[in-house]
Image: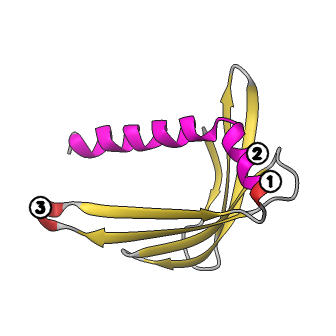
């Protein structure tokens, strides 16, 4: 993965590309609200997916034992866009990302 821009602040934005044997895929968005350490609201767009933009809200809640609960909600602009994104296999990448995060946190 190559991060081209990552300005994680209210009004900032991001763009990154991921490359694998199937090609290169670009993603970008804007940070609408960054309120550390409890909330992030951002847009998410896949460059190969037309004009569809997803609105994502992530809420982080402290738990006992130094743990944190992350609740993420993604809202697409249509059911068709949501279904197409799910059919793309993006759930595999999301799950892999959270598994890697679990490994990183367990090593600390």
C-alpha span from label 3 to label 1:
41 Å
Q: Which residue is drawn at 58% across and 79% down?
A: 10
Q: Tell which of 58 and 27 is nearer to you.
A: 58
Image side of residue 67 versus residue 72, left or right: left
Q: Where is residue 87 in the image (x, y as percent from the top left)?
A: 71, 38
CB within 8 Å, label 2 to label 1:
yes
What colouring style does the render use?
secondary structure
User: Dot 1 lies on which element?
Assistant: helix
CB within 8 Å, label 3 to label 1:
no
Which residue is labeled 1 in the image?
A: 80
68 vs 49: above or below? below
Image side of residue 29 versus residue 10, left or right: right
Q: Where is residue 83 in the image (x, y as percent from the top left)?
A: 72, 48
Numbered circles on residues, count:
3
Secondary structure of the magenta portion, mostly?
helix
Name the mark nearer the viewer: 3 or 1: 1
Which residue is labeled 2 in the image?
A: 84
62 vs 72: above or below? below
In which image quadrant can residue 28 be found?
Answer: bottom right
Q: Which residue is drawn at 16% across and 62% down?
A: 66
Q: Position of residue 45 (x, y in %)?
A: 74, 56
36 vs 53: above or below? below
C-alpha span from label 2 to label 1:
6 Å
Q: Is residue 89 magenta?
A: yes
CB within 8 Å, label 2 to label 3:
no
User: Dot 3 lies on which element?
Assistant: helix
Which residue is labeled 3 in the image?
A: 65
Q: Earlier in the sequence, mark 2 or mark 3?
A: 3
What range of the chain is rendered magenta? Answer: 81-106
In which image quadrant can residue 93 be found?
Answer: top right
Label 1 Cα crowd, 10 Å radius (few <14 / some 14-19 / many 20+) = few
Q: Residue at x 52, y 43 (%)?
A: 94
């Amino acid at each position: 993965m190559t991060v081209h821009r990552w300005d994680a602040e209210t009004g900032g934005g991001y763009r990154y590309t991921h490359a694998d044997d199937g090609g290169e895929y670009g993603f970008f968005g804007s940070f609408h609200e960054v309120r550390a350490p409890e909330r992030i609201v951002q847009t998410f767009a896949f460059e190969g997916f037309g004009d569809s933009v997803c609105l994502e809200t992530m809420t982080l809640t402290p738990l006992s034992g130094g743990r944190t609960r992350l609740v993420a909600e993604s809202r697409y602009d249509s059911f068709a866009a949501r279904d197409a994104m799910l059919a793309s296999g993006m759930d595999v990448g999301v799950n892999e990302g959270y598994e890697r995060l679990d490994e990183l946190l367990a090593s600390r």
